[in-house]
Amino acid sequence: MGKGGQDEGRRNFSACGGGGGGGDGVSFPAWARGVSECLDEFKVNPDHGLSSDEVQRRLQIHGPNELEKHEGPSIWSLIIDQFNDTLVRILLVAAVVSFVLAWYDGDEGGEMGITAFVEPLVIFLILIVNAIVGVWQESNAEKALEALKEIQSEHAMVKRDGELVPNLPAKELVPGDIVELRVGDKVPADMRVLRLISSTVRVEQGSLTGESVAVNKTHHKVGMDDVEIQGKECMVFAGTTIVNGSCVCLVTQTGMNTEIGKVHSQIHEASQNEEDTPLKKKLNEFGEVLTMIIGVICALVWLINVKYFFTWDYVDGWPANFKFSFEKCTYYFEIAVALAVAAIPEGLPAVITTCLALGTRKMAQKNALVRKLPSVETLGCTTVICSDKTGTLTTNQMSAARLVAMGLRPGGEIRSFKVEGTTYDPRDGRILDWPTGHIDENLQMIAKIAAICNDSSIAQSGHHFIANGMPTEAALKVLVEKMGLPRGSDGSFSHPDEILRCCQWWSGNWDRIATLEFDRTRKSMGVIVKPSLSGRNLLLVKGAVENVLERSSYIQLLDGSVVRLDETSKKHILHALYEMSTNALRCLGFAYKDDLADFSTYNGESHPAHKLLLDPSNYSSIESDLIFVGLAGLRDPPREEVHRAIEDCRAAGIRVMVITGDNKDTAEAICHEIGVFEYDEDISKKSFTGKEFMFLSDEDKKFHLRQTGGLLFSRAEPKHKQDIVKLLKEDGEVVAMTGDGVNDAPALKLADIGIAMGIAGTEVAKEASDMVLADDNFSTIVAAVGEGRSIYNNMKAFIRYMISSNIGEVASIFLTAALGIPEGLIPVQLLWVNLVTDGPPATALGFNPPDKDIMKNPPRRSDDSLISAWILFRYLVIGLYVGLATVGVFIIWYTHGSFLGIDLTGDGHTLVTYSQLSKWGQCQTWEGFKVSPFTAGSRQFNFDDNPCDYFQTGKVKAMTLSLSVLVAIEMFNSLNALSEDGSLLTMPPWVNPWLLLAMSVSFGLHFLILYVPFLAQVFGIVPLSLNEWLLVVAVAFPVILIDEVLKFIGRCSNGARRRRLSKKRKDE
């Protein structure tokens, strides 16, 4: 973007019938051609406009003047995309298989039939909710393009067939149309200014170019074909607004060929290339590994148990009489399904979403409004922040920093005052060493000019003060308030509560009767004023110091006396100007004239001299022989908190790159002041204009981007931002990019984290972003990065917790199948544990307090593993214990009358040997096998008809013990997840009271399904006695002791590694 159609979307208007010139296919550079050349190229007479027939012909060639409507993906394709995830696919297969098995078993009816249908239905529900959320998020992706269309003009005043059509639909404009623009109009297409109707025309194009102030337009051509948007002073662009004056223009580009059309294309292109967040990539990788593991374990389960459903006899040493048991085959297929359900942390997506949502609430409290949940996690691994300067690193509120006034003697030293304050609040700061109550004549004249030769105002909105008009002029009015009123002033023209009380006083004493508007030639503005009571007229002038000084013949001294401007005084003034300019201050000079000749009696439009004011070429002669009185240095000051935020970034290993449209000197001065550069640092290889950087080779670009410390890119265009982001991402950096204008939207889309400004930002930028800053403050980004890191650490905690729990469940099922004992946990129970019981503790781990040193560690790489080899080993050990404990308690109930002194015979159940339990499938062949009835809660189980049913229906108590041990272990394991390596002695459970509450909720939910008969029937469990609960706690508690030992080993290992690294650094 930014080269007036040279970069992309090129069209040869001549070849298409838009003009008569060369057919080389290059867009006509209207900004670099005179008015007559442009009219010839587009074959149009400005007084007549295009004919209706010609309009129709061009409309067929160029199409309507509107942005393309890109068809987004269909709802069906979005739904399909939600299942393009390994974990989701495994779940889908598991749900389908379990539904088929439930249907097959449905003929048998009974309690287990109800249970069998619960599992597939719950899994289907999870998948449906997940798909709905995903489709909703992705359907919002095209909103930035819709917001872009909102800023297009709907109507235009066009000259057609010799007549002015006042409200022609803007979409009917074609290249070559003659359009008249007036104050308040939104520009409908890219156009070349043919002539100015008013003396000046100013256009607000900051949303497209990033410029902070409205710019003046002219009909004079620009000297170069290759020039950035800001330099095309004779062009107006679609979507910008006329804020002053009126003019006649020639349409040169329409629709997608306009600058805003190119932004539209770039946003669409960037939205097509959006990548998954680092966390999603890791979870996808985890899903693929999990698929392989599940496949291997399922195969092992089948191989181990093939003897149960596929049998044969040996005849003469060879296998014969093969028998296949479909019932047994189905049973072990169900075990494989249970394995899939156990291995997948079904609750993980919900817990991640909940944790990210909680994170967005925390960030909102810090003025960072997150639009896309995954960006919360991505913030945590940000390695580079590309920040705009104006409004983000600075306040975007111009303020006076220095005031220079004349001295007591001709040629003597001039006076300089430092001005405090960084906002538009007149009470923010004061003028140091100010003669309060004794303002001399010279300072009074400066105050008078600054207050009256000024078109801005200040308004209060809540606790904030807002400028209406030019920011530089608003800053001057605030300066006047800080200067105060001269001694003896009665304040009769102002109210004590008035924000601009002093300005009101000056305006009340002097009436403005004429304005000499600013233009780029003389670079000044003047007003003719007359006293409210009596006296002669004055001309008050402010403008660029060099220009005002050049037209001055006198200076006013401290006491009000006027003397000739000599070389010594001029030298002092220019020296002060140089010092202020090198400190990045924007300087304005003040002057007046009391001998106005023809205008000394001017009183309005009826005066004979009024005709001189109608021609702006007369303004320079009117503003001659001025009396110079002083100058002020203004700047957009850095935010107070930014310096500390930059230091925090440096400590956190995050590089800060400033990308601004401002000039190089100003940007460098600000970067030195806020700490992006050190004061004595050589920045010759760290500060570039956008053009300088783009002229480098790709290798040189990457070399400079890899440098440590800060970088600055000034006079940068939107295309430069996009190129810088692409290069950084190619180098593996995780990039956060700030922006506020329409032109920033493609770069915001392209970055890993697009950050829009909430106050100064356009709707297009906000829609393209991942996060919006409510206060437009750079330090808010740094705070959000810290919050993102904390959230990621907490997410790692609950991901480790949930995965370790799932490893335990897999180990339990695998051991059950390997040992040949009856199934101890059924799929619906595992689903309940994964979704409901594990959910509250996992979510509560998201409330773990942040690490105090979280912003003193380097950012993690986006490809860093979610779980290290040591952590994986730890949780394999824990998982193995979970498997042993759940299977072990199942075996204990069947084979032991007591365990660790806890009596288990209270329910009257029959004890069997381990050998019988592991060969329960052969029960029918056992002679004399009998089972006594036993009680469970209010139910009694009797097996007189079929004693072998003791290992099927009768296992309900053992299953309940297994499930309860699993729940208890996972609650204790959530305490282990409080810290990766820290002991519970140093990080006790009460550091996160939410976790204790969550554990209580999970136990409460477990009690609910145990003691509510209907739920107990659905889940195939029964109530437990006190002794049985003691057994559950005794078997579950050791998981804490095991992990404490593993953590201790990890701490010792990490300490030894750190000592080795420290010694190695010292040796080097």
Image: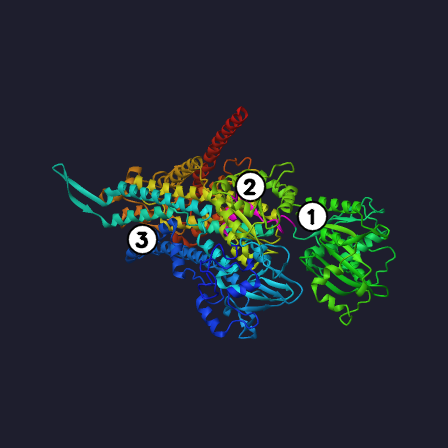
Q: Amino acid at mark 3?
A: Val
The image position of residue 947, as x and y in percent, is 28, 47
Q: State the residue position of label 3.
A: 97
Q: Marks 3 and 1: in contact by CB < 8 Å?
A: no
420 vs 932, left or right, is right
Q: Residues within 10 Å of mark 3 (few under 14, many from 20)?
A: some
- Residue 321's image quarter? top left
- Which numbered disc, 2 or 3, marks the residue that appears first in the sequence? 3
Q: Secondary structure at mark 3?
A: helix
Taking the image as drawn, is residue 381 in sight? yes
Q: State the residue position of label 2.
A: 654
The range drawn in magenta is 373-394
Query: Tag count in the figure?
Result: 3
Q: Nearer the viewer, residue 1028 or 158?
A: 158
- Residue 60's image quarter? bottom left
Cα separation, mark 1 vs mark 3, equals 73 Å
405 vs 781, left or right, is right
The image position of residue 635, as x and y in percent, is 69, 50
Q: Residue furthest top?
A: 1067
Taking the image as drawn, is residue 189 in sight? no
Q: State the residue position of label 1.
A: 585
- Picture colour scheme: rainbow
Q: Residues within 10 Å of mark 1 (few under 14, many from 20)?
A: many
Q: Nearer the viewer, residue 369 or 143?
A: 143
**Residue 382 lies in the magenta stretch:** yes
The image position of residue 1056, as x and y in percent, is 50, 27
